[in-house]
Image: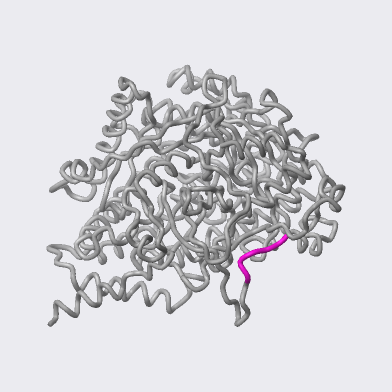
Amino acid sequence: MRIILLIMALFASLPALADEGMWTFDNFPASTVEKTYATEVTPAWLDHVRLSTIRLTNCTASFVSAEGLILTNHHCVESCLAELSSKDDSLLDRGYMAAKQKDERRCSTQLADVLVGMDDVTRTVAKSIGGLDDKAANETRKKVLTELEQSCEQASAKAKSGKVKCQAVTLYDGGQYFIYKYKRYDDVRLVFAPEADIAAFGGDPDNFQFPRWSLDFSMLRAYEHGKPAKTPNHLRVNFAGPHADELVFVAGHPGTTQRLETRAQLEFERDVSLPSTLLRTAELRGRYIQFGRSAPADEQLVEAPLNSLENGLKVRRKLLDALHDDALMARKSEDEKALRASAQIAGLDPWTEIEKATARQRALHLPHTFIEGGAGFNSILFRYARLLVRGADEKTKPNTARLREYTDVALPRIEQQLYARVPIYSEVEVLTMSFSLQRMREWLGPDHPVVRKLLVKESPDALATRLVAETKLNDPLVRKQLWEGGKSAVDASRDPMIVLARSLDGDARAIRKQFEDEVEAPISAASERIAAERFKAYGTHVYPDATFTLRLNYGTIQGWVENGTPVEPFTYLDRAFERATGASPFKIPDSWMKVKSQLDMRTPFCISTSSDIVGGNSGSPLIDGEGRVVGLMFDGNIHSISGDYWFDTAKNRAIALHPAIIREALEKVYGAKSLLAEMTDG
């Protein structure tokens, strides 16, 4: 009888899976979808969608033509727009449209990866760490994953199918390990972006709100060998869009979720990590706003980072609210209680071990965040310096002995970042670095050894001003020479940013090692033991936490009930004009006002779906049962933010751009009929 009750408790604690789940493509619950929605999801359908979906550096996207045309969100290309802008010409504000393919402009730091293969290496990893203590297992695991990545790339270089990029992927908190293989496009060019006023209509006040009216889409193109890439796997666009209650799918790369973490880990987020981050971010936002008020040109300089900062603030504020929800935290405790009751664990209790490790994490959090995490040195130029200093040291070591972010697999991406000709504005660099130095001194205290080393003779403002004025790292040719010159060149450099990074590296590495040994290692070991018990109880009938790897979700087109009032799942163009005030963030651009009489005011604009998404899903295609794009994901409602920790089927909603408004804009506002034809011909 006791066993039966335990099984009942376990299944009662399983999440309600209606429309919930960020499923890997090798474990998608196709039979459940067929039984529930009478829609067959075949292996061929899954393969086509997988090979048509793209992981950008920061978002998701999809191929929508046979000539490498890519559809994604406007906010996913903001960094490219900023990179291609100048102080006097902001592409972010005025938008961009390439009249011909020769006018498509390269986004030098953007990548487009397509998942082409997945190898399960769980047994190999488990065998390598069997019998080792936590510290040794942590180090060995990283070494083995590096070896697996390396051998994968070496094998692909000899294969007829062509070279791929290989990445080790951890699922179910160590329950599974995979090597994911990606076809990489490193030549990605800007094709089209609307003006910021319509792309982000509603701005921060509308962020995570619904109804919405923001034209959050842009287009890129992948190139190979200087020509548009041939992409036979692409998604056709159904500009008619979906109807209410229709089954839809989201293919994308959700960033991170923490639904499988223990209560102790969530309490650390609630009590330590989120509050400290919110305090720093809120103050930096104020400084950005004040800086931008000095002149229109200055406002343009901080527009993109301010947008990102404000989005992050709202997310973290609502995450903190979610973790203060006693009922939801109680549910987490009940889930743990049920699993612990069924577990047959010899030796130390893994939940208790995680509690001990998070207690140590609280003590190490501030120095790790500011010094190793770089929160005390918020500067693009310093980040370049650290890449150069650490890279110079790490490249002298065998590949498997390096820090994971400097293995041979990672080096091409580092080189792309270092060599990119990205505009760096000294006044913004001084602002962010002086601020971060001030906060490091405040939080670590003026007597902390690192703080005294840096600020015993100079104030944060003076140090930041001097470093930014004297460094030459804003020149990509200088960065390239140092990188290619290796350790001897970096060690000999007297560039002040390099000198700073060099002087800090020993302290930062020591803090990192302490964190890895005392926090990361015991949590990883305990999480793997919990994962083993979870697999015994549930198998793969639950989905893994998001890890910015490709996932597929199913849901329906639906609104929700807010304080007793139904929220309809569609918005229309006419309401955008009714809400317009003529001033940002509720300003409709002149390009739209000029053709207002030609526009169909009943064009659907945005869609609400029950899809389970989080950050990283931005730019994901919303797909119907026939595999056609029927929307473009760009946001969630305010309730969806708690989806990092748990999913509320009643209120969590995702927001997509309707394809009809994309057609209306391209055809009537921007005259981009050739792009429409290319998308339609597919």
Taking the image as drawn, is residue 497 in sight? no
Along the line of sight, which residue is nearer the eye, 234 or 206?
Answer: 234
Q: Quadrant of residue 22?
A: bottom left
Where residue 246 appears, as percent x and y from the top left, is: 52, 62
Along the line of sight, which residue is nearer the eye, 320 or 616?
Answer: 616
Number of on-image labels: 0
Tell me where the magenta segment starts and ends, as one range. Answer: 568-572
Above or below: residue 551 compared with residue 495:
below
- Quadrant containing the C terminus is top right
What's the residue at 66%, 26% (across, down)? 101
Left or right: where does residue 19 sit relative to residue 569? left
- Quadrant containing the N terminus is bottom left
Where residue 404 appears, as percent x and y from the top left, is: 36, 37
Left or right: where does residue 452 sit relative to residue 154? right
Q: Quadrant of residue 149?
A: top left
Where residue 403 appears, as percent x and y from the top left, is: 36, 36
What's the residue at 37%, 58% (across, down)? 361
Q: Residue 571 lies in magenta, yes or no?
A: yes
Main SS class of the magenta portion in the image: strand
Color encoding of the figure: one colour
Above or below: residue 149 compared with residue 321:
above
Where residue 375 appears, as percent x and y from the top left, is: 53, 48
Above or below: residue 17 compared with residue 54:
below
Left or right: where does residue 641 sit relative to residue 79? left
What's the residue at 76%, 64% (across, down)? 575
Taking the image as drawn, is residue 118 in sight? yes
Q: Residue 427 lies in magenta, yes or no?
A: no
